């Protein structure tokens, strides 16, 4: 059974919710890396880094390929594009529209409470 677009986005944003996984993506922007190289850069164990890489693979954000005993990780930009396209739908929320919302809610409304 194939995942729906909503389910794919759930996996994608779930994977992006972790700072270690985001750091892995940042490292892979530079070039493909082995799990061992990623672990060294992160200062984490290979086992933990491999678990994070597995979550990123399930989300479609990276792909992994075995070359002998070495597992290479590669960034998959199409998954990032899906997230960016979805987020673009919220582009209409600029500071002016938030100011208008605050005005509509009344003078006592403090939007900072809602943004924290």
Image: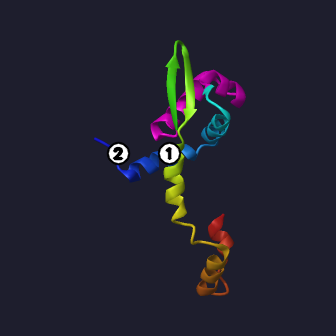
Query: Closer to the N terminus: mark 2 or mark 1?
Result: 2
Q: Which quarter shows the N terminus?
A: top left
Disc number lying in front (2 or 1) = 1
Which residue is located at x 67 percent, y 74 percent? 95
Q: Is mark 2 on a helix, strand or loop?
A: loop
Query: Of the numbered discs in the image, which one, if any, rests on residue 48?
Result: none
Which residue is located at x 64 percent, y 43 percent? 19
Query: Is residue 14 among what the camera can see?
Result: no
- Judging depth in this view, the residue of 60 and 111 nearest the camera is 60
Labels 2 and 1 touching (C-beta < 8 A): no
Mark 1 lies on residue: 79
**Is 56 contained in the magenta span?**
yes
Image-quadrant location for residue 46: top right
Query: Is residue 87 among what the camera can see?
Result: yes
Q: Where is residue 103 in the image (x, y as percent from the top left)?
A: 64, 86
Q: Which quarter shows the C terminus?
A: bottom right
What kind of secondary structure does the magenta stretch mostly adopt? helix
- Please provide the residue range marked out in magenta: 34-61
Query: Of the numbered discs in the image, which one, if any, rests on residue 3?
Result: 2
Which residue is located at x 68 percent, y 71 percent? 112
Local crowd size for mark 2, using a 10 Å CA cut-off: few (<14), some (14–19), many (≥20)? few
**Is 15 contained in the magenta span?**
no
Q: What element carries label 1?
A: helix
Q: Where is residue 41 in the image (x, y as percent from the top left)?
A: 71, 29
Image-quadrant location for residue 38: top right
Q: Position of residue 34 (x, y in %)?
A: 61, 23
Residue at the outermost top position: 68
Q: Is residue 109 above or below residue 73?
A: below
Distance CA(mark 2)–CA(mark 1): 14 Å
Specify whether 3 is left or right of 115. Answer: left
Q: In this view, does 45 lie above or below 110?
A: above
């Amino acid at each position: 059974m194939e995942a729906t677009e909503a389910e794919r986005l759930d996996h994608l944003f779930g994977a992006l919710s972790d700072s270690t996984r985001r750091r892995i993506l940042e490292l892979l922007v530079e070039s493909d890396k082995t799990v061992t190289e990623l672990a060294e850069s992160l200062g984490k164990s290979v086992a933990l880094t491999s678990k994070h890489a597995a979550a990123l693979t399930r989300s479609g954000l990276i792909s992994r390929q075995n070359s002998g005993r070495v597992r290479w990780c590669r960034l998959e930009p199409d998954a990032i594009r899906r997230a960016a396209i979805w987020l673009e739908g919220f582009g209409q929320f600029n500071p002016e529209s938030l100011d208008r919302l605050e005005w509509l809610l009344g003078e006592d409304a403090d939007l900072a409470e809602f943004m924290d």
